Amino acid sequence: MVGIGTSDVNLDKFRHTFCSLLGKDEDSWGLSYTGLLQHKGERSNFSTRFGQGSIIGVHLDTWHGTLTFFKNRKCIGLAATKLQNKRVYPMVCSTAAKSSMKIIRSCATPTSLQYLSATVSSSSSSSSSSTSSGSDSDSSCGSDAEACHRKRCRWRT
């Protein structure tokens, strides 16, 4: 399971329970390999299953307060909103023996005036035009300006 959580996550509460810890409380959000999204102990279908060799991306936009997940570098959807002013940390957990996960890329960028200008410009142009720009756009993941912001953190080969 991959996701995020605040420093208030109670890691001892489920010490004697065999369960996926992320998302069991209101202070964490987790995506399971089964495709279930978990928060406040509630599970919802979010994506198809993933497993060995899958690349799971977690994009936390602190400016807009959103959490978006990616699978094999394709957006699978918006998982949470209203996360502004929350200090969160990346988290992983597993109930499977001999499982492993590794961080491929980590990136943090401050919100720039250029990004904010692109957001305003994109809002103005999207009302006058309905064409999509670029092959990476996905309507479930936000505006083109947000896609541009994500590209700044993309893994470069």
Image: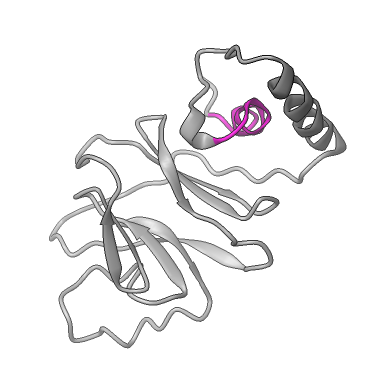
Left or right: 78, with 124 as reference point: left
Tell me residue 106's x, y (percent): 54, 44
Relative to 119, residue 101 above or below: below
Q: Is residue 151 magenta?
A: yes
Report which quarter residue 71 is drawn in: top left
Tell me residue 64's x, y (percent): 66, 50
Left or right: 111, with 154 as reference point: right
Left or right: 14, with 106 as reference point: left
Q: Return the residue found at the far front.
A: 128
Q: Tell me how the rendering is colored.
A: one colour
Name the residue at 34% across, 67% down.
22
Left or right: 25, with 35 as reference point: right
Nearer to us in this view, 152 or 114:
114
Tell me residue 134's x, y (percent): 57, 13
Number of numbered markers: 0
Report which quarter residue 13 is drawn in: bottom left
Nearer to us in this view, 147 or 18:
147
Q: Residues in magenta?
A: 142-154
Query: Is the stretch drawn in magenta largely helix, strand or loop?
Result: helix
Tell me residue 45's x, y (percent): 25, 51
Name the residue at 48% across, 26% down.
138
Name the residue at 22% across, 41% down.
50
Name the residue at 24% across, 62% down.
94
Relative to 27, residue 74 above or below: above
Q: Quadrant of the N terminus?
A: bottom left
Relative to 133, residue 29 above or below: below
Q: Is residue 70 magenta?
A: no
Report which quarter residue 51 is drawn in: top left
